[in-house]
Image (spheres, grey):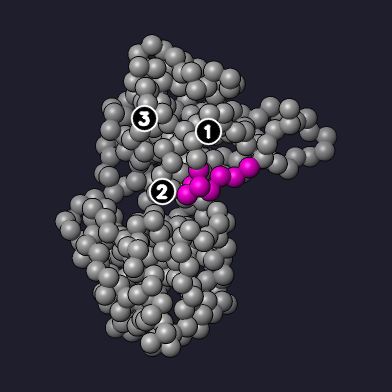
């Protein structure tokens, strides 16, 4: 049976009873024999932000070595599987070289899969189980993890972006989140900041996209504001985007503005190398997420709306955000693949 090449967008990933293979095309000299691909099991809880991280790592690994990737949706019963040393969901799959996942509900399945079938386990984000249980923990620095041989600290979360900054473009991108545990959402405050950015920025064309957390009436409120104030803005719901839409828009944009609550989108824009402005929101408390955003502002990798309003231009990121490739390099260097 031929192998199926595919990409699954995080927002459209649906549970499957039979996992699907992913085999990339990796260029090689004509005289070089084709090496057997390394088998990777990717666990998914179906959450877009978590899938973006694990798919970002898969993409980065595929740039370094041949990967045969199987997507496995998490399901109940992982604790019992671990105790019994079994993993029925992988019974028809080849043994893995690497097992990865992001999100708390993937932790026990990761360990169950390794106990039953072997391979190394890489968990993305800080696990709620003891970190010593995993071969590699990829943890953002805002979680302040203790030093350990199996812990790799990253600057923010992994994603699928690549550096694509379009310096000669006259197009801007606005990305809007919504209510969260970390920030208070203010409908009017965000709308007014957007209006001022469009009105006073030299950028001529703007696109705004919402996210799953954006309140239902916000897009319509923005459309009405566009009509009343004669603003140059196209509003697009996240439901109307494809898996490659964000990367394409970032590659065409000279700057991007992101609501402060949307940490994943902030790091996607930074990874693309695009100047990033923050549409300000009030924090609910000064927790690790808020501290992480504050650190980006203090390091001048991003700029708040108030600073931009005072006449300061948006800065290019002062450092290279290439965390998915850095993690892939560590994995391939430590466990083979290069």
Q: Residue furthest top?
A: 84
Q: Quadrant of the N terminus?
A: top right
Q: Is residue 265 magenta?
A: no
Residue 107 marker: 3
The mark that comes first in sequence, 3 or 2, is 2
Q: Position of residue 141 (x, y in %)?
A: 32, 47
Q: Is residue 263 left or right of residue 182?
A: right
The mark that comes first in sequence, 3 or 1, is 1
Span colored in magenta: 6-13
The Cα–Cα distance between marks 1 and 2, rounded to whole angstroms, is 19 Å
Residue 16 marker: 1
The Cα–Cα distance between marks 3 and 2, rounded to whole angstroms, is 16 Å
Residue 49 marker: 2
CA neighbours of label 1 inside 10 A, class few (<14), some (14 to 19), many (20+) = few
Q: Nearer the viewer, residue 103 or 37?
A: 103
Tell me if label 3 and label 2 are in contact, CB under 8 Å: no
Q: Is residue 38 left or right of residue 186?
A: right
Q: Is residue 7 magenta?
A: yes
Q: Is residue 295 visible?
A: no
């Amino acid at each position: 049976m031929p192998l199926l090449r595919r990409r699954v967008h995080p927002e459209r990933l649906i549970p499957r009873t039979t996992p699907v293979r992913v085999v990339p095309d990796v260029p090689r000299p004509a005289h070089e024999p084709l090496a057997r691909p390394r088998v990777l099991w990717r666990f998914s809880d179906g959450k877009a932000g978590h899938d973006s991280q694990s798919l970002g790592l898969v993409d980065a690994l595929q740039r370094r070595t041949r990967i045969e990737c199987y997507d496995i949706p998490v399901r109940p019963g992982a604790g019992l599987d671990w105790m019994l040393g079994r993993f029925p969901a992988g019974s028809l799959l080849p043994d893995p070289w690497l097992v990865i996942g992001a999100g708390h509900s993937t932790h026990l399945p990761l360990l169950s899969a390794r106990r039953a079938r072997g391979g190394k386990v890489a968990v993305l984000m800080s696990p709620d189980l003891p970190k010593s249980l995993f071969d590699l923990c990829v943890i953002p620095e805002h979680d302040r993890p203790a030093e350990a041989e199996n812990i790799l600290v990253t600057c923010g979360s992994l994603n699928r972006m690549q550096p694509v900054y379009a310096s000669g473009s006259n197009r801007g991108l606005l990305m809007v989140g919504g209510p969260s545990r970390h920030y208070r959402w203010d409908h009017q405050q965000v709308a007014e900041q957007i209006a001022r950015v469009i009105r006073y920025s030299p950028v001529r064309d703007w696109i705004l996209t919402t996210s799953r957390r954006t309140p239902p009436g916000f897009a319509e409120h923005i459309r009405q504001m566009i009509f009343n104030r004669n603003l140059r803005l196209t509003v697009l719901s996240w439901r109307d985007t494809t898996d490659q839409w964000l990367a394409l828009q970032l590659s065409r944009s000279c700057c991007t503005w992101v609501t402060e609550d949307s940490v994943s989108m902030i790091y996607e824009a930074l990874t693309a190398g695009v100047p990033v402005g923050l549409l300000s929101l009030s924090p609910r408390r000064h927790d690790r997420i808020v501290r992480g955003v504050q650190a980006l502002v203090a390091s001048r990798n991003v700029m708040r709306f108030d600073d931009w309003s005072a006449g300061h231009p948006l800065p290019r990121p002062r450092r290279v955000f290439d965390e998915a490739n850095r993690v892939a390099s560590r994995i391939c260097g430590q466990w083979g693949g290069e």
